[in-house]
Each structure stands twice: as C-alpha cells, then as structure tokens.
Image: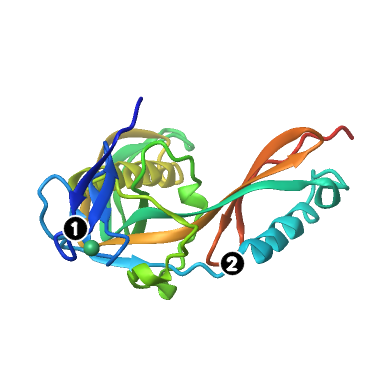
Amino acid sequence: MIVVAKEVSCSHCGAPVEFKSGEIVTTCKYCGFTTVIQTGQAFNFEHSLILNNYDVVRMENCARSWMSSGFMKPGDLAKKSKIVEAELVYLPFWVVFGVATTKYKGIFERISPPVVKEGQVEKKYNWLILARKATVFPTREYDVPLAGKIPYDFQKIEEFAKLLNSEMGKDETLDLAKQQIESHHSFLLQQNIDRVVECSTVLELKQMLYLHAPVWFVKYQYKEKLYQLIIDGSTGNVLKGDIPLTKF
Ligand SMILES: [Zn+2]
C-alpha cells in the first residue's frame, strides 16, 4: 500500500499537521493539541504520556545486559553483537477501563456423569489496545506503567523520536477490547467447564484514555544476521527479543 501523507491545519496553533491515510487521531508536534481527523473536532479523551527514561547509550546497556543473561543465548552474544539501528517510537495506545462480565453455561465432563454448570466471570480491567494496525508489538506482555503517566506534553518528545498517530477510533477500540476480553474469559472458563453451551460478555465502560508510550525498536547484528529487540523506554525492559539459534 502506498501511504500518502496529507496535511490539515492544527485548530489550536494553525501549524500544519501531517497525517497518513488510515490515521484517525492526530497530535500537533508544535503545540501537542490532539484532533480527530475525520470530524476536525477536539478530542474528548484524556491524552497522556509515559516518559522515556533511556537515551541511546543507556538503552544499549539494557540490550547488552539482556544479551548476557538468561538461557538459550550464545555465550558471546553481548560481546559480538553490534547495534545497527535504534529508533525511539512513541506508540499510541487506548486504555479501556471497565468491568467485563461473562455469563456462561457449559458441561463439566471431568466427572461421571457430566454435569451442567452455570456461572459468571466478572473482572475489572485496564485493557490495553495498540492503536496501530500493522505494528508488531507484544501488547499482552507489556505492562504499561500507568502510575507514571503525565498529561501529554509535546515538549517532552525528543527531537529524534517518532510519534505515531492512532488508526483506531473509540468504537473500533471498544469492539476490539470486548473481543479480546471475551477470548481471555473463554480461556479462564476452561477451569470451570469443558464444553461451552452458552456464553455472552458485557463490557461496562468506566473510562477511556489515550496514551503515548516510548518504545525502542532496535536491530542488532550477530554473525552477519539481523535480529530485533523491542525495549520499553520507561523501564528499560526488553519486551521482545529475537535470539540467534545456537547448536548445543
Ligand atoms: Zn498545534
């Protein structure tokens, strides 16, 4: 797909705001004002920022300590790897605060004769949805440090960093959150029943929050091959790392 950048004017400061096709919410890099592109209306949600605490040098230290720890890694990985690319990206997320209730009816087959069981699973969530469709990111492994969020401040975004806009609106985000929670609940139900007869989930929304969080996308080279690391810019944790195959 060819992505053409378009421009609108920021309704707050008048500066040109660039966005790409598919993006729904955009943030002005000159004043930090957030706009819904299709309607041009102001944004009704809290927009927060998680601060990045790592510069290139400190981020590389995190990468090397990951390389030199844990199992299944070549012994010389930290020593022989070369970081060839490191990009700091502020990824857009939606956080859906709510209570999800799944009512179910099913068959418990672990005893003889099997019995019908009914019940419900009710849980409170801060469910995280990545607002980008093509970005590969381990969202479920990512424990976003919500306690450290501040109101979005464009001046805290480093000059060299990339800020991505949301490709998902409110309704789409809620649908997706509901689907994902439902499938998480189906997984939990396996403890109670072996076969589902009926199952329905209701998500009671308390609040929604839009958030930009810093993530380092790193490429490193080891023995002529390239591998990827994804590092949380807030904590320095490696969220996902490719490990070169070793022969034991
Ligand atoms: Zn502006």
Q: Residue under circle 1?
A: 10
Mark 1 burial class by Cα count in 10 Å: few <14, some 14-19, many 20+: many
235 displayed left or right of 61 = left
Quadrant of ligand 1 in image: bottom left
Q: Nearer the viewer, mark 2 or mark 1?
A: 1
Identity, as a three-letter code, of the amino acid under mark 1: Cys
Q: Foreground: 1 or 128?
A: 1
Q: Foreground: 124 or 65?
A: 65
Q: Residue under circle 2?
A: 54
Q: Decide: is 234 above or below 245.
A: below
Q: Decide: is 1 above or below 75.
A: above
Question: Cβ of disc 1 within 8 Å of ligand 1?
Answer: yes
Question: How far from the left and from the top, in percent, is residue 179?
Answer: 30, 41
Measured in 3D between alpha carbons, the distance from the residue under mark 2 to the one under mark 1, in whole angstroms, is 30 Å
What's the residue at 57%, 67% (across, down)?
Answer: 235
Picture quarter containing residue 1? top left
What's the residue at 36%, 38% (across, down)?
Answer: 133
Q: Is residue 101 visible?
A: yes
Question: How far from the left and from the top, in percent, is residue 157?
Answer: 42, 65
